[in-house]
Image (cartoon, rainbow, N blue to C red):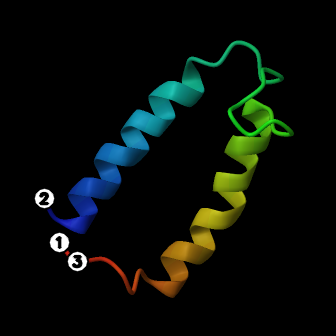
Amino acid sequence: MTPAERHRAVTGTFGDRVAGVTDWSVPTPVAEWTARDVVAHLLEWFPGFLAAGDPVWHP
């Protein structure tokens, strides 16, 4: 699987899960975070991760 294919697969699954959320205030395994906090974190963090590249990626 190429990095682009992997990205599409992961974002597709992520999108499906986000679309299925009915209560954004539910707790997560991280005690202080809600579902809203997790999604906000990923949306804020991931663009920078992509811009920097992934020095650890080894297909």
Marks 1 and 2, the one that precedes in the sequence: 2
Q: Amino acid at mark 2?
A: Met
Q: Farthest residue toward the top?
A: 22
Comparing 58 with 22, the one in front is 58
Q: Position of residue 25 (x, y in %)?
A: 83, 23
The residue that label 1 is drawn on is 59
Q: Nearer the viewer, residue 51 or 25?
A: 25
Whole-angstrom CA distance, mark 1 to mark 2, is 8 Å
Residue placed at 32% from the left, 50% from the top? 8
Q: Which mark is residue 58?
A: 3
- Left or right: 45 with respect to 58? right
* Lower position in the chain sequence, tag 2 or tag 3: 2
Front label number (2 vs 3): 3
Which residue lies at the image location 25% right of the left edge and 66% below the top edge? 3
For the residues bearing labels 3 and 1, Cβ distance under 8 angstroms: yes
Determine the residue located farthest toward the left in the rendered image: 1
Q: Nearer the viewer, mark 1 or mark 2?
A: 1
Q: Which picture quadrant has residue 56? A: bottom left
Question: Which residue position holds label 2?
Answer: 1
